Amino acid sequence: MSRLAERFRQLRGRGRTALIPFITAGDPHPDLTVRLMHGLVAAGADVVELGVPFSDPIGDGPVIQQACERALRHNVSLRDVLTMVQRFREDDPDTPVVLMGYMNPVELMGYAEFATRARDSGVDGVLTVDMPPEEMGELAASLAAAALDSVFLVSPTTTEERMQAICAKAGGFIYYVSLKGVTGAANLDVDAVGARVARLHGMTGLPVGVGFGISDAATAARMAAVADAVVVGSALVRRIEANQEDLDAAQEAVTALVAEMRQAMDADAPASVE
Amino acid sequence: MSKTSEAMQQPVDFARFPDERGHFGRYGGQFVPETLMAPLRELQDAYARYRDDPEFVAEFQSDCRDFVGRPSPLYRAERWTRKLGGARIYLKREDLNHTGAHKINNTIGQALLAKRMGKTRVIAETGAGQHGVASATVAARLGLECVVYMGAEDIQRQSPNVFRMRLLGAKVVPVNSGSRTLKDALNEAMRDWVANVDDTFYIIGTVAGPHPYPMMVRDFQSIIGRETRQQMLDVEGRLPDALVACVGGGSNAIGLFHPFLADADVALYGVEAGGYGIASGQHAAPLCAGRPGVLHGNRTYLMENDDGQIIGTHSVSAGLDYPGVGPEHSWLKDIQRAVYTSVTDDEALRAFHELTRTEGIIPALETAHGLAYAGKLAVELGPGKTIVVNLSGRGDKDIQTVAEREGIEL
């Protein structure tokens, strides 16, 4: 069983919704990333989503774009990101790590080489934002050969037919994009999201995570009630941005928000099975 | 690649490309965030429905005639030809179109489609401003809201076009991310589209982006090549020996080339921006010096570093300052149907002056790249041969840039 599947199995047993924080690797400085990943786990993260910086992140809003720019000022490459995961794994053999990024760096490294290196570094799942399942054939084969989960986005505009096709190809969990827009936007409709998540649950046994636009503990708690996982990105990255000159302060600000979200999600959870 | 050698052995049926998912060989495709897959499907379906619809075609043609001023003349550059002493040069006068460049052919087509799809808002990216002006123009005419994304850097170097867009009622949004040029404007327009898919039509200005854009823009621009073909048959009684066009994203080039792809005897030359020279690394010539990769929704040749990050480009002309190129060009390069080359900023500027002084035509700096290469090619081919250069745009927008480079204050 993959590390992601195992983690979601455990959580389901405990009646707990997964909290998946996102940070961009190398933001604001490569020295912080591994330490921050451990900090996220200590604050209550169940899975860590690590952004691979890219020069032209068309699916991301200004907050994560700027995180990419900060990381790229230190020339943080896909190879560097894999090294960071490897270092994280030395001290945390259990927490699943999902890479989220764009095709071009993977394209240049080569699918097979990327998949092998990612697996050897301890990566569990890969989400390439600009790679829809229709184009995914060769990459999917390489990821599968390396026993990595392909995580896909499903959006409010995804048709039923495509949802089926995506569920058939997906591994780890389905990432439901909770709004029409880029990361960090703010116009969430919890009921509409809940309905779409329920629809996905009818199609797949995979857990369904929800992300894009979840900016505070209250929203995280409301989303936790309808989904199997809550993904939080821009809200954390904003705190990094605000503390970019002081790595300790950035670490503290980010982990504090994760802990707050964790607490709110658990408090709102239906009578605990624990 | 096996595809390439296969293609070289037997004639390629160019009409079969792209395939139904937008692939030109290994290039093209749809590499976009999930949210855009549905609107792309909607666009594909709408375009499939209307591209051969007699009423749509008739409206496109009458707009091209009455609003744009087509057909654009094929002008024999007598004095320039004599001066060079080589092949006879013809200029396809896209600079005489309404708004001053070939860009309007495409925006007319896409706006007619937007209207039929019930979209009330159009967005566009622009580099030199020509596509932005062409988009704002059709939006004004059809009563559509229009937002144009433009790199902050380009806004500075193309201020007259910014004002034109505003006069036409468009909102021009400066883009301050990344390199603050055309590629970043495209990123920002894509983000806008992701957030506003219900009412918004994205008018992409070149033959790049996700399928169906490279095909659709090519089809609208192919009016250039179809007219050229007929005009050459009328005046010369035969097809030209060579076609030359500048290539940024490559829409004016594909528009000229496409109706000639099956004519193996017509040589095709695409001219990229060599900037300070290919060896300097400061250029915008992905076909000459880049590698295949994925950017802006398609697989194509790109300018990237060894980590797969897109790198900054340089060209004296804002319209060519783009790190990618249309996927069909990448394919035509690989199957060796077209030859791609580059000329430097300085060569383009010399051609700019030469054409202005010999023929009384001030060309756009983008176009001047094609002219610079055509001048060399004319000498190489010698008398008795004919060349058609796509005079893709007029140079009024560039006089400030030229003056500045030459230390002249206007």
Image (cartoon, rainbow, N blue to C red):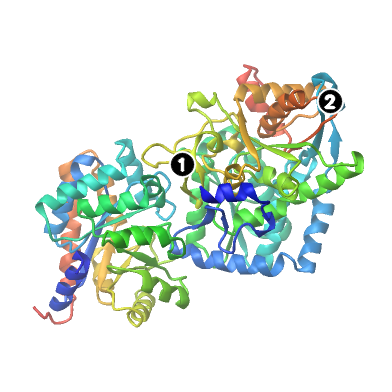
Horizontal and vertical percent position of residue B205: 62, 49
In front here: B71 or B84? B84
Please tell me whether mark 2 or mark 1 is closer to you in this view.
2
Name the residue: 71% across, 50% down.
Answer: B221
Visible in this render: residue B392? no
Q: Are marks 2 and 1 on the same chain?
A: yes
Mark 2 chain: B
As shown in the figure, which amino acid type bears the numbered disc 1?
A: Asn
Whole-angstrom CA distance, mark 2 to mark 1, is: 50 Å
Quarter of the image for residue B391 reads top right
In front here: A265 or A115? A115
Mark 1 chain: B
Horizontal and vertical percent position of residue A175: 33, 67
Decide: is B164 above or below A169.
Answer: above
**What SS does tag 1 mark?**
loop
Decide: is A140 above or below A58.
Answer: below
Instruction: Kindly identify which residue carries mark 2.
Output: B383
Visible in this render: residue B185? yes
Name the residue: 63% across, 43% down.
Answer: B250
Determine whether, in the image, residue A263 is placed left or right of residue A175: left
Name the residue: 65% across, 27% down.
Answer: B400
Horizontal and vertical percent position of residue B158: 61, 35
In front here: B406 or B215? B215
Name the residue: 81% across, 63% down.
Answer: B58
Instruction: Kindly identify which residue carries mark 1.
Output: B176
Q: Residues within 10 Å of mark 1 (few under 14, many from 20)?
A: some
Decide: is B267 above or below B406.
Answer: below
